[in-house]
Image: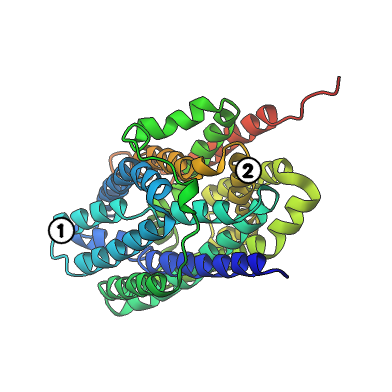
Amino acid sequence: MNHSEVRRKAAVGFIFVTVLLDVLSFGVIIPILPMLIKEFSGGDSSTAAIKYGMFATVFAAMHFLFSPLLGALSDRFGRRPILLLSCFGLGVDYVFMALALTLEWLFVGRVLSGITSASFACATAYIADITPPEHRAARFGVIGAAFGLGFVLGPAVGGALGAINLRLPFWVSAGLALTNWLYGMFILPESLPKEKRATFSWKRANPVGSLQLISRHPELLGLAGVQMLYFLAHHVLPSSYVLYTNYRYGWSELMTGVSLAAVGILNILVQGFLVRRAVKKFGERRCLLFALCCGTIALTIFGLAFDSLILWMALPIFAFMGFFQPAIQGLMTRLVGGHEQGQLQGASGSLQGISGLIGPFLFTSAFSYSISKSHPSWELPGAPFFVAACLLAVALVVVWFRTRPAPLV
């Protein structure tokens, strides 16, 4: 193994730990934030769902506005300083939220979180910098495994800590995020050489400007639409899952955390052990189709699950959604040059931000309406999951038609 390969593998290890700690600090509060908002809302699930939707929407709005800026800055000044800035800001924000005495205070904290939430996009660009195109899907799978591992430990720890005190997970998250920042300060090398950096332009650094990259590459348009639908559907979990399982099954913070940990474990198994083999054998297109098919089926089962055992049985099917991001990122990063990888991730962040402006309000409103006391004769608490399943079904159709191989002449 030559020296450059050793350095590339070491850099992947650095990013793995960075993403792991970042997601871990975020995952710790997943089972807690909806319940804290419910506490501030007088204990009413329907009201808490609407307010939580507002929190998630403002988070996404900030992500939408600032992801392109940070992506463009990473193309100009390198990935390392942007990653460090994001991690430090996230840690400070968790301290701010841990001290929140009012719902408004907590709301401001989510605004700050949205602004500093670009580390995953920068990490993706980092991997694209150091990895040949043919190996990117597998490397993105490694990063997905780090995401999954953080998602395993975070909600489980958050649920356990939240059972002690609802504020404790915020303090733990702050410590993890700041540890991540210190780790990067001393360990993380830069991935983007100065000669490959792009000039900074406000035209490229705003949400509309970043999306112009997609318009310059028409072949990206279909994949960007699919990614948008995926991002939108995926918001059903952070926006509705905790409130849904608490309402329908009476789950505690601890039980919710354990179930989300199970999701993370399955995701690790898929992304850490199956993605590379599956992409190599079946190709990115087939893996993408398979992921969307499994996601559609699993979310439908979630919505129909009148008993929690049925939901548990659907989790292994849902885990194969883990093929989606490595496969689509592998396809999309092939279509742009090295100097545009940061802008591509900024555009992807903008799409995620747009979906975040719509998704949380869409799903929490669907949940609130379906259990509202204004129509006591019926309820359909699984409504958010049915909506999400329909979105993935549309994405499945788009992938099928837009990525078909050209006929042989």
x then y, percent, for residue 1: 73, 70
- N-terminal of the pair, mark 2 or mark 1, is 1
Q: Residue at x 28, y 76 (%)?
A: 168
Colouring method of the image: rainbow
In the depicted view, which residue is nearer to us: 129 or 213?
129
Give yes or no for contact between labels 2 and 1 (Cβ–Cβ under 8 Å).
Answer: no
User: Which residue matches tag 2?
Assistant: 292
Q: Quadrant of residue 9?
A: bottom right
**Amino acid tagged 1:** Trp
Which residue: 54% across, 64% down?
148
Secondary structure, mark 1, is helix
Quarter of the image with the C terminus is top right
Report x, y in % for residue 126: 51, 55
In the rendered view, tell whether residue 13 sits above or below residue 131: below
For residue 38, what is the image quadrant?
bottom left
Instruction: Residue at 61% x, 43% y: name it.
Output: 328
Answer with left or right where residue 221 lies relative to residue 352.
right
Categorize mark 1 by other alpha carbons within 10 Å: few (<14), some (14-19), many (20+): some
Residue 35, can we see it?
no
Regarding residue 169, the answer to whether it shows in the image is: yes
Label 2 crowd bin: few (<14), some (14–19), many (20+), radius 10 Å? many
Q: Does 396 appear above or below 13? A: above
Residue furthest to the top in view is: 409
Question: What residue is pinned by disc 1?
Answer: 105
Identify the element where label 2 is drawn.
helix
Q: Quadrant of residue 64?
A: top left
Compared with 390, 117 (above or below) is below
Q: Amino acid at mark 2?
A: Leu
Q: Residue 182, image x and y in percent?
A: 36, 74
State the image coordinates of residue 331 (x, y, percent, origin top left).
Answer: 64, 41
